[in-house]
C-alpha cells in the first residue's frame, strides 16, 4: 500500500469529503480516465453552497435558518431521495453521484455535512442504531438530527427509542461524533460489496486492502480478501486469509464451511500472483 496515500488518508488536515475523493482516485485510477476527469470538478457543489448561503444569510434565528437551509437543500436542490436495496457503483463516486442526485448514504451524509458546515453551522456525523445520520447544531441547546438520504429528522421520542438499542447504561449514552476512520471503513465496505456484485474483483480487492491498512487483521475483511484473491486465481495467498478467518472466528458458520473446504484445497498446483 502506498505510504503517501495512506498518510493523506489519515491526515487531520484533510476533511472527510477530500478523503472520499482521494479514495475514489485511488480505487478507480486505472479505469475510464476521461470520465474521471469529466466529473473530477466539484463546481456544482460550490454552486449549491453559494445558493444555500444566499437563502439563509438574512435569517436571524438559528433554528429558522437551519430549517430554511434543509428545505433549500432537499427540495430546491432535489436532495430528497429514498433508500435503495442496492446502490450502483456510480452512487459511491462523489462528483458523479452528486450531479446525478443519486448518492450512497455515506457519500450523501458527507456532502450534506460539507454544505451545512459551509453555511456556518457546526455539524458532524453520528451513529444512531442502524444508521449514520447528520447532526446540525443550531445552538448550544438545540440540534437537528436527520437522515441524509431522506432529509427526515428524528424527534426526541424516536431518538430515545433508538438509543435504547445501544449497549451500556442509557443514562450514560452520548452521541459522539463519528470518527473519519470509521466513516471511511463504512464507505469502503459498502463500495466493496457493490463492486463484488458487478464482479469488479480487482477494485473490490483494492477496497479491502485499504480497509486492512486502517483496521489491520480484521478477520471478516481477511475472509473477504481471501474470497477476492480466490476469484483472481491467487489461491495460495487466499488460503492464508481463509485460515486466519477460520482461526479467529471458529464459531462463524462460514468458518466451519471454509474449514472443510481448506482441507480439500491443493495449493501446490495453483498460481501465485
Image (cartoon, grey):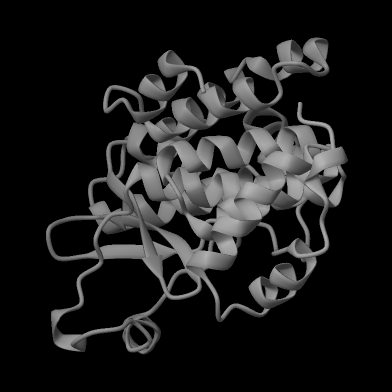
Residue at point 79% right, 45% down? 267
Q: Is residue 21 left or right of residue 193?
A: left
Could you say which is closer to the camera, residue 208 or residue 128? 208
Could you say which is closer to the camera, residue 264 or residue 133? 264
Could you say which is closer to the camera, residue 186 or residue 270? 270
Residue at point 53% right, 35% down? 210
Q: Is residue 221 left or right of residue 196?
A: left
Q: Is residue 79 visible?
A: no
Above or below, 130 against 69 in this view is below
Could you say which is closer to the camera, residue 66 or residue 10? 10
Above or below, 108 against 252 in this view is above
Above or below, 3 against 180 in this view is above
Residue 84 x, y percent position in the rendering: 75, 63
* Quarter of the rendering occupied by the C terminus: top right
Residue 120 x, y percent position in the rendering: 28, 36
Above or below, 202 against 155 in this view is above
Residue 249 x, y percent position in the rendering: 52, 71
Q: Is residue 179 visible?
A: yes
Q: Is residue 271 left or right of residue 10?
A: right
Residue 170 x, y percent position in the rendering: 21, 87
State the image quarter where residue 146 is shown: bottom left
Seen as rendered, the residue at the extreme front is 268
Residue at point 62% right, 32% down? 94
Number of callouts in the render?
0
Residue at point 38% right, 79% down? 155
Amino acid at each position: 500500500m502506498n505510504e503517501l496515500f495512506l498518510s493523506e488518508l489519515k491526515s487531520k488536515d484533510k476533511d472527510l469529503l477530500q478523503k472520499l475523493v482521494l479514495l475514489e482516485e485511488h480505487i478507480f485510477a486505472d479505469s475510464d480516465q476521461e470520465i474521471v476527469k469529466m466529473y473530477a470538478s466539484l463546481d456544482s457543489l460550490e454552486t449549491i453552497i453559494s445558493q444555500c448561503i444566499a437563502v439563509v444569510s438574512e435569517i436571524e434565528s438559528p433554528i429558522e435558518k437551519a430549517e430554511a437551509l434543509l428545505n433549500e437543500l432537499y427540495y430546491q436542490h432535489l436532495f430528497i431521495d429514498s433508500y435503495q436495496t442496492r446502490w450502483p457503483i456510480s452512487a459511491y463516486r462523489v462528483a458523479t453521484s452528486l450531479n446525478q442526485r443519486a448518492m450512497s448514504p455515506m457519500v450523501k451524509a458527507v456532502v450534506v455535512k460539507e454544505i451545512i458546515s459551509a453555511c456556518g453551522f457546526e455539524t458532524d456525523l453520528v451513529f444512531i442504531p442502524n444508521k449514520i445520520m447528520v447532526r446540525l447544531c443550531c445552538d448550544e441547546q438545540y440540534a437537528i438530527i436527520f437522515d441524509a438520504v431522506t432529509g427526515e429528522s428524528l424527534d426526541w421520542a424516536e431518538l430515545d427509542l433508538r438509543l435504547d438499542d445501544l449497549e451500556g447504561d442509557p443514562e450514560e449514552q452520548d452521541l459522539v461524533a463519528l470518527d473519519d476512520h470509521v466513516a471511511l471503513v463504512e464507505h469502503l465496505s459498502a463500495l466493496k460489496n457493490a463492486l463484488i456484485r458487478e464482479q469488479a474483483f480487482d477494485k473490490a480487492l483494492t477496497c479491502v486492502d485499504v480497509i486492512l491498512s486502517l483496521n489491520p487483521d480484521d478477520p471478516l475483511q481477511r475472509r473477504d480478501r481471501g474470497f477476492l484473491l480466490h476469484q483472481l486465481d491467487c489461491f495460495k495467498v487466499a488460503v492464508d486469509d481463509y485460515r486466519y478467518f477460520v482461526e479467529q472466528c471458529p464459531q462463524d458458520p462460514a468458518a466451519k464451511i471454509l474449514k472443510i473446504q481448506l482441507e480439500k484445497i491443493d495449493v501446490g498446483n495453483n498460481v501465485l500472483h
